[in-house]
Image (cartoon, helix red, strand yellow):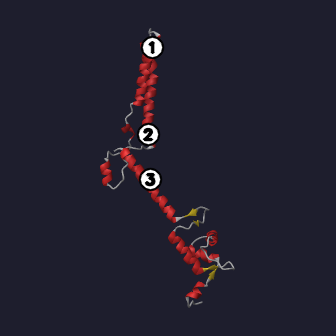
Amino acid sequence: MAITSMDELNEILVNSKTLEALFGVKDRTIRYLADNGIAKRDSHGKYLLMDSAKSYITTLKIGNAAIHTDDSEEELNLTTERAIHEHTKRQITEIKLQLIKGQVHKSEDVETVMTDMFIKFREKMSAMPAKLARKLEGKDKSEIQKILRKEINSALNGLADYNPADFYSDEHIEISNETIRALGVEVNEREGS
């Protein structure tokens, strides 16, 4: 059948299988598009090919109308998805910058340093009875308390006297805020350099 005018083209009716093949979607999506006025139906349930195609293309171009995916009931909004993707990329970049500046730490680096600190603390505490046994022999109660307090405080200070640089990852670089600004990255002054 040869089409001789735009009016004839505008009157072509197709079934849902034809729209599925044309749009590359499944039956459920075609029904969703029809329910939302994107795929145009006539009074007999057939689809107006030209109107449906134009409306579908406009919907995809604008990206604002939600279209159900074939495999789930979630709505896909291309503009929103792109915005979420860009936001996630920005967050990753910010975290990497904080990592480089030593403002955040990788969990495995923290685990390694903290494990080392607690092992040293445990060793000091475990060695304390043998170390103090002779020192405490024959001492009165107040002297024993004084010696024990001194040794316990020394062990506890070992926990408090950590070096923040121990937590830096391999990616850490000392970098000034001026250098970061020169790269075109916004710097929060409260973070320091």
Disc 3 packing (10 Å; few <14; some 14–19; many ≥20): few
Q: CA distance from mark 1 to mark 2?
A: 36 Å
Residue 22 left/right relative to 127:
right
Q: Nearer the viewer, residue 117 or 45?
A: 45
Residue 144: mark in rendering: 1
Disc 2 packing (10 Å; few <14; some 14–19; many ≥20): some
**Image coords of residue 125 (percent x, y):** 45, 24
Q: Is residue 172 above or below residue 65?
A: above
Q: CA distance from mark 3 to mark 1?
A: 55 Å
Disc 1 packing (10 Å; few <14; some 14–19; many ≥20): some
Where is residue 115, by image quadrant? top left
**Image coords of residue 109 (percent x, y):** 42, 41
- Dot 3 corresponds to which residue? 91
Label 3 secondary element: helix
Q: Amino acid at mark 1?
A: Ile
Residue 110 left/right relative to 69:
left
Closer to the N terminus: mark 3 or mark 1?
Answer: 3
The residue at the point 48 percent across, 62 percent down is 82
- Dot 2 corresponds to which residue? 110
Residue 176 left/right relative to 90:
left
Label 1 secondary element: helix
Q: Is residue 48 above or below residue 106?
A: below
